[in-house]
Amino acid sequence: MTKAQLIKKHEAEIWALKEQARNVYVGETYSLHQEDGELYVEHPQGTLVFDIINLHRDLSTWVSIVRTGHASHNAYLQERLEDSIKECV
């Protein structure tokens, strides 16, 4: 098999794996709306649809996880800021 054929074969395999990927990173959202008991979250790769009843049941857990992550990120930023100040002195 030639180098070009190997590259083409591996590119096809990589593309197939990407098509099968189930994870989507949502860095920003374009809109949020609800209709017929579902929450629609539009983002650059498409739309997430949540059942509102199940989402409401899990909402306190979502909020807790987000608050913890936000606090950790703020602590990280504070630490970086303090390191930067030390370097300037």
Image (spheres, helix red, strand yellow):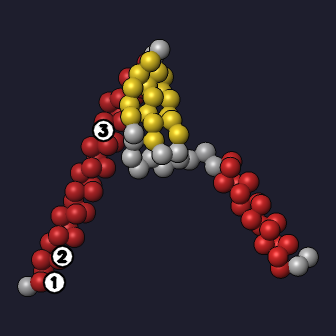
In front: label 1 or label 3: 1
The quadrant of the image that shows the C terminus is bottom left
- Please give the name of the residue rendered at 53% of the width and 40% of the height, measured from the top-left corner: 46
Q: Marks 2/1: CA distance?
A: 6 Å
Q: Marks 2/3: CA distance?
A: 29 Å
Q: Which residue is mark 2?
A: 83
Residue 57 visible, this angle: no
* Front residue of this view, candidates 41 and 79: 41
**Residue type marked 2:** Asp
| Residue 69 horizontal/vertical position (percent) | 31, 49
In front: label 2 or label 3: 2
- Please give the name of the residue rendered at 27% of the width and 49% of the height, measured from the top-left corner: 70
- Please give the name of the residue rendered at 66% of the width and 54% of the height, measured from the top-left corner: 18
The first of marks 1 and 3 along the sequence is 3
The first of marks 2 and 3 along the sequence is 3
Hey, which residue is sitting farthest left in the picture?
89
Q: Which residue is mark 3?
A: 64
Q: Marks 1/3: CA distance?
A: 35 Å
**Residue type marked 3:** Ser
Q: Secondary structure at mark 2?
A: helix
| Residue 26 horizontal/vertical position (percent) | 45, 46
Q: Secondary structure at mark 1?
A: helix
| Residue 42 horizontal/vertical position (percent) | 45, 36
Q: Which residue is mark 1?
A: 87
**Residue type marked 1:** Glu
Relative to 64, is 10 above or below?
below
> In the visual, does 71 lie left or right of 25?
left
Relative to 81, is 15 above or below?
above
Locate residue 67: give its quadrant.
top left
Q: Are marks 2 and 1 in contact (CB under 8 Å)?
A: yes
* Front residue of this view, candidates 66 and 45: 45
> In the visual, does 33 lie left or right of 13?
left
